[in-house]
Image (spheres, rainbow, N blue to C red):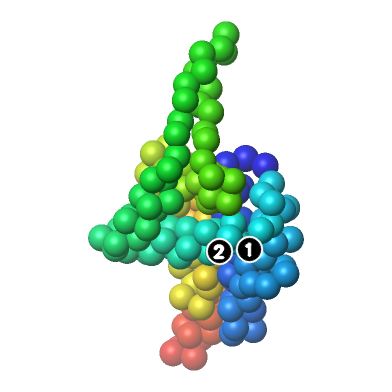
Amino acid sequence: MTDEDLLLAVLNSAPVVDGSVIDELDGVAGGTFARRLGGSGSQPEVSQLRRVRAAVHAVIRDPANSGVAALAAVLSQVVRTPEVTLSGVRWEVRAPADDLLAVRVVLAWSDSVERHPGRLRPCANVECNLFLVDHSRPGSAKWCSMTTCGNRMKARAYASRTRSA
């Protein structure tokens, strides 16, 4: 799993289904979800993932938001050590075991906003709670999925236009 896949998996772990938020980090499912991402699935790890998800959501939706302080707190005990190899510098990340998966999410978020400025964004469907990284050439992707949100939004716009006419 790439860092971007990890980031999107955590950001999109609370989808809206039939008008209700389904939180994949709740209860026993949260531990299973964390293990699927390479974590231990412990309750403290899942709680930290939930806090990081909320903070990254806040930062993406409102960059002036104080979610940055919560992300900084997650990184407070992290040590990154460089290791020089023949293929370049590799960074070893050390953190408390229950924080490591959340730390990886924060670092993936940072890498994404550096490498793809303005392209990590929420779905344009206000009824959706998912995010996307826009890899299109013009940078104009709006929806988490063209087959779900994109199709719904276009169908609504068409219906609205035909009712007006």
Q: Position of residue 39 (x, y in %)?
A: 67, 49
Residue extending farthest to the top is 86
Q: Which mark is residue 32?
A: none
* Residue 94 in sight from this viewpoint: yes
The image shows residue 19, relative to residue 13, as above or below, that is below
Q: Quadrant of the N terminus?
A: top right
How crowded is the residue under tag 2: few (<14 C-alpha within 10 Å), some, or many (20+)? some
Indicate left or right for 165 with 62 as reference.
right
Q: Residue at x 32, y 56 (%)?
A: 69
The image shows residue 79, relative to residue 138, as above or below, that is above
Indicate left or right for 62 with 155 as reference.
left
Q: Position of residue 90 (x, y in %)?
A: 53, 22
The image shows residue 18, relative to residue 119, as above or below, that is below
Q: In front: 86, or 156?
A: 86
Q: In front: 5, or 125?
A: 5
Disc 1, SS: helix
The image shows residue 164, relative to residue 107, as above or below, that is below
Q: Between marks 2 and 1, how big is the CA–CA gap?
A: 6 Å
The residue pinned by badge 1 equals 43
Q: Position of residue 57 (x, y in %)?
A: 44, 63
Q: Residue at x 53, y 73 (%)?
A: 128
Q: In front: 77, or 75?
A: 77
Q: Residue at x 74, y 61 (%)?
A: 32
Q: Position of residue 129 (x, y in %)?
A: 52, 70
Disc 2, SS: helix
The answer to whether the residues at label 2 and label 1 have Cβ atoms under 8 Å apart is yes
The amino acid sitting under disc 1 is: Gln
The amino acid sitting under disc 2 is: Ser
The residue pinned by badge 2 equals 47
How crowded is the residue under tag 1: few (<14 C-alpha within 10 Å), some, or many (20+)? some
Q: Quadrant of the C terminus?
A: bottom left
Q: Residue at x 38, y 64 (%)?
A: 58
